[in-house]
Image (spheres, grey):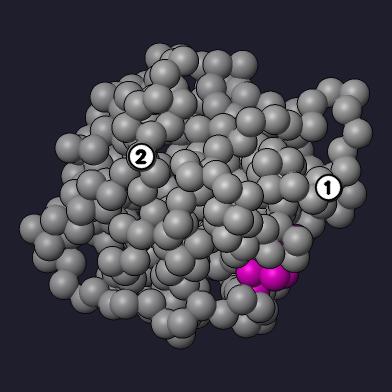
Amino acid sequence: MKVVRSDDHRKHFPKGELYGGEFVRPFECPERWEHIMDRLGERGFADMLNPDALDMSPVRQIHDEGFLEFLETAWDKWQKAGYTGEILATCFPARRMVVKKPKQIDGLVGYYALAIETAITSGTWEATQASCAIAETAQRIVAGGERAAFALCRPPGHHAAKDMYGGYCFINNAAVAAQMFLNDGAKRVAILDPDFHHGNGTQDIFYDRDDVLFCSLHGAPEYAFPHFLGYADETGAGKGEGYNVNYAMKPGTGYDEWGAALDDAIKRIRDYSPDALVVSLGVDTYEKDPISFFKLKSEDFTDYGSRIAKLKLPTLFCMEGGYAVKEIGINTVNVLEGFENG
């Protein structure tokens, strides 16, 4: 399996995030990438590629133009306003407020942010572009005839909505890749999101479309970020009715229940008969992950990789979450090896 990666991810690393009422070292950190790379090397994944230059055309099909302009210019505007720290949202258009786009950078940040844990730094836009370029390059590999490819994206993407960033995500890499498959002639694409946190951004992007089936396995939003999306009764709208499937599971969920949800998602994907599959590969379902509450063990990741393989679809894996840093490489590569041997 070819792996697409880039050292440019290091350009994005905020000094801290707000968690539990205090600033802590971000859970989404460069070491995540390093541990995955180390494990890939240990297990013989030697076909490593740097990404091609980013093509913004499919990105613009997924994201609002004003939002993309904000991401590109936010740091310059922040500095010109005289601020010296990293960009964090301090206000939001909450209930019964008027949702109009502000002109001052502080207001713009709140307008486009969906959460305040995610900071923008001087290198965030460069790293975000590189991350999306990784997904695009990996998509071209799969579209070109390879059975599968792994896009080692950082920053991740599945929380990025049409016009909002947050949850460590800025551009929705998996959504862009799915759109590229459609642009290449696919009639239908499925996105499977086994990350612990609901892929709210991906749901937002495809909610009223029938050319992308979205299946997300995640912590129930009553208990888990992003809290305000991801319920089982969110099934799509208009043409998209029935093409959005949420498997929301409670604290303490183990592999038996989680695996049953995966099997149902796989059946739905098989019935949908897509031309390609995009997997938003988050491994924060692991039992030792510091910001989740599922109980999957490392060997479970191998098993579910083999289950995904039985779909026999051209498959693109896009890296998402996973914050048990010491084990992230083992769990990620277990999925890929399970798939390759499945």
Residue 63 included in the magenta stretch of the image: yes
Q: Residue placed at 71% from the left, 54% from the top?
A: 162
Magenta span dominant secondary structure: helix
Which label is found at residue 15? 2
Q: Residue furthest front?
A: 82
In the rendered view, tell whether residue 245 sits above or below residue 316.
above
Report x, y in % for residue 143.
50, 79
Q: Is residue 214 visible?
A: no
Residue 196 included in the magenta stretch of the image: no
Q: Residues within 10 Å of mark 1 (few under 14, many from 20)?
A: few
Q: Distance between the residues labelled 1 and 2?
A: 28 Å
Q: Mark 2 belongs to which amino acid? A: Lys
- Among the 4 quarters of the image, the one containing residue 159: top right
Report x, y in % for residue 91.
70, 30
Q: Image quadrant for the C terminus?
A: bottom left
Magenta stretch, residue numbers = 58-64
SS label for mark 2: loop
Which label is found at residue 16? none
The residue closer to the viewer here, 225 or 43, is 225
Q: Mark 1 belongs to which amino acid? A: Lys
Q: Image quadrant for the N terminus?
A: bottom left
Report x, y in % for residue 126.
45, 66
